[in-house]
Amino acid sequence: MSNADSGTAAARRFRTGGNGRLRLPGLWAGPALALLALVLSAQPLLAFQSDVKTLAVPVSHLGPGWTLVAENVGTTVDLGQSYTGQYVNNFTERFAIFMVVQLPNAAVAELSMASARQQGSEGEMGSQPWPSLGDGGGVAYAIEQDDAFLSVFAFRVDNVVAIVMAGGPTEQAADVRGLALGYTVLQHDRLRAALQGALSPTDAPPTYPYCGPGQTPRFQSGFAMLQEQLGSKMGLPRECEHSNPDNGDALQKTSTGLSIYRKSTNTPTFTNGSEHWALTPEGPLYWAGASVDPPAGAQAGLQP
């Protein structure tokens, strides 16, 4: 199948007939709806300072092959302003959704995140808390339905709640999660820039260390599989994977530490500076100390 045919198949898979919108099963829509239900109960809102659509990551920042297939801007007395953009990739069976909800102040936005964090702490809908994401911490969801996988991240930056979703075939779950994390980085940084009045007037895509044109930081291959095990411990990718010229290892900084692929042992590892994790053929290993490689006393599993 050609790239174009693959993109067409992806569009058919995720759209409903005729209206061009992506088909999200009720279970998939749950995280977003849970947030919006609480947001809708908020106090009447004040006038906003900016166009909410400008706060969402535009399709031009997503990389090659992405197409905007549907968007919606909502304005109500209770909700204030919300924007949702739905995208499919013409080269892969992937889709993405960005939703931003601008609230009157940070306190109301924080209330809207409380329910999602509670879900994360209780593990509902495959969720887990992400303490280092956004203001006050975010939450991640991993949802499987039939042969499809959806990765969702929800967080707050000041008075804006953002929900980032990426979906694709279940067999590509680790890479889909890596894609969602990369796009969460884009959305998070865009909101920070907007808060500081630093959005580019030309809306040029942001640049990150070691990333080429059209690239965004994301975990791939071994790092993606390791992140699937570690979750929020591994944080968000802050640069693209790159080689260490001294030994051929692959390196990638994250918001919580450093990912290292040890070429000599074919082992992806992660360290937060004092603790280390590695993904080996025998399973994950944990150890503390200065050693980059698992010592003889490394513990099986993820926890000390």
Image (cartoon, helix red, strand yellow):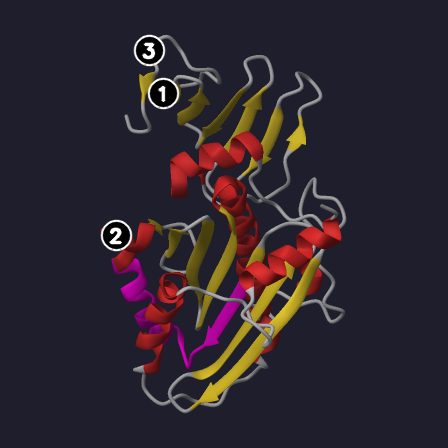
Q: In which quadrant of the rendered image does the N terminus lie?
A: top right
Q: Secondary structure at mark 1?
A: strand
Numbered range of the magenta stretch: 97-118
User: Farthest left residue?
Assistant: 122
> What percent of the width, then of the height, locates residue 276?
41, 25
Residue drawn 64% across the image and 40% down it: 240
The residue where tag 3 is placed is 297
- Number of residues whose C-alpha sits closer than 10 Å to that of mark 1, classed few (under 14), some (14–19) or many (20 or more): many
Q: Amino acid at mark 1?
A: Trp
Of the pair 108 and 268, the residue shown nearer to us: 268
The residue where tag 1 is placed is 287
Q: Where, by quadrant of the figure, is residue 249 drawn? A: top right
Question: Rounded to the nearest whole Å, what is the CA distance between mark 1 and mark 2?
Answer: 26 Å
Q: Secondary structure at mark 2?
A: helix
Query: Is residue 209 left or right of 38 when viewed as pictured?
Result: right
Determine if residue 70 is in view. Answer: yes
Q: Nearer the viewer, mark 2 or mark 3?
A: 2
Q: Where, by quadrant of the figure, is residue 59 drawn? A: bottom right
Q: Amino acid at mark 3?
A: Gly
Of the pair 168 and 44, the residue shown nearer to us: 168
Q: Amino acid at mark 2?
A: Ser
Vertical comparison of 140 with 55: above or below: above
Q: In which quadrant of the rendered image does the C terminus lie?
A: top left
> What percent of the width, then of the height, locates residue 155?
42, 61
Q: Secondary structure at mark 3?
A: loop
User: Along the polypeptide, which appears first: circle 1 or circle 2?
Assistant: 2
The residue where tag 2 is placed is 121
Q: Are marks 3 and 1 in contact (CB under 8 Å)?
A: yes
